[in-house]
Image (cartoon, rainbow, N blue to C red):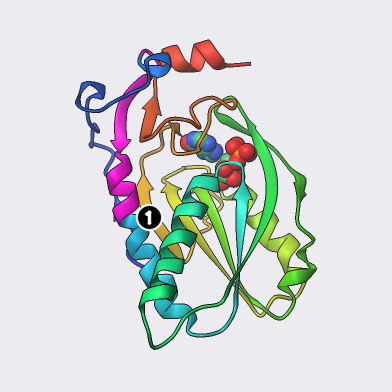
Amino acid sequence: MTNCIKIEDSYQGYSLDSFCIPKHYEDDLESVLIPYGVIHDRIERIAKDIFTDFGKEPLVAICVLKGGYKFYTDLIDKINSLNRNQGERSVPLSVDFIRLRSYQNDKSVGTIEVIGGDNMESVKGKNVLVVEDIIDTGRTMMKLLGLLEEFQPKCVKVASLLLKRQPASNGYIPEYCGFEIPDKFVVGYALDFNERFRDLHHICVVNNNGINKYKV
Ligand SMILES: O=P(O)(O)OC[C@H]1O[C@H](OP(=O)(O)OP(=O)(O)O)[C@H](O)[C@@H]1O
Ligand code: HPA
């Protein structure tokens, strides 16, 4: 794994009052763990690392929906910007999407459903970058990597914005990681709790009020 910013368990985050939080979520959050601007600056560096590592060979970038969509679009934008501006070389990119789901409330239900996505035949013989919002237990990623192997890619690397210090983790570690975070349920920047909070700008810790309000 390349450099990953470690957020310690003792870190309390920022108070909600220091940032702009939508009215509809202001009672449902404990703190701002990672502000939007910091997310962006970190993604800029991950994009640079990927651009450096993948050379000139074509890259198939797969977005893991739904949670990965914001990280994916921001990461691809930044790689494209390097492609436009680093005169001597560029990485040809193609985009693919897959949708997997396994969470209800704040728990993995254990079975990982593949709900849809592109035909993965396109990865055969190619360098593949899987782009995910969070590795928590690691189950979703192990399932996806198993599926991809059947289509014989040349190589597969994973970029995850977040890696949770989860006691029940299967030990999976991505090649590129934005932030290693404490074992708390986080929302915002497309991460959800039962489909809520994807429209929240910053990555925040949900509080008990939010959990009770939106649990099913
Ligand atoms: O490491 P794990 O414990 O498997 O958890 C990580 C997965 O959980 C979330 O997906 P979710 O099933 O909530 O679907 P979503 O992306 O549509 O929110 C997240 O987007 C990851 O894909
Ligand atoms: O902490 C989390 N937040 C949102 N979605 C998730 N999926 C796994 N862990 C999380």
In the rendered structure, the answer to whether residue 177 lies left or right of residue 195 reads: left
- For the point 54% across and 27% down, the residue is 193
Residue 3, percent from left and from top: 32, 65
- For the point 60% across and 55% down, the residue is 63
Q: Is residue 16 above or below residue 126?
A: above
Kind of residue sitting beneath label 1: Gly
The region drawn magenta spans 27-41
Is residue 3 found inside the magenta-colored segment of the image? Answer: no
In the rendered structure, the answer to whether residue 105 lies left or right of residue 134 reads: right
Question: According to the image, label 1 marks what residue?
Answer: 178
- The foreground one among 11 and 205 is 205
Q: Is residue 90 above or below residue 182?
A: below
Q: Residue furthest left?
A: 18
- The foreground one among 21 and 1 is 21
Residue 198 is at least partly visible in this image: yes
Residue 118, percent from left and from top: 76, 57
- For the point 44% across and 34% down, the residue is 188
In the rendered structure, the answer to whether residue 53 lies left or right of residue 103 reads: left
Q: Is residue 157 above or below residue 125?
A: above
Residue 60, percent from left and from top: 62, 69
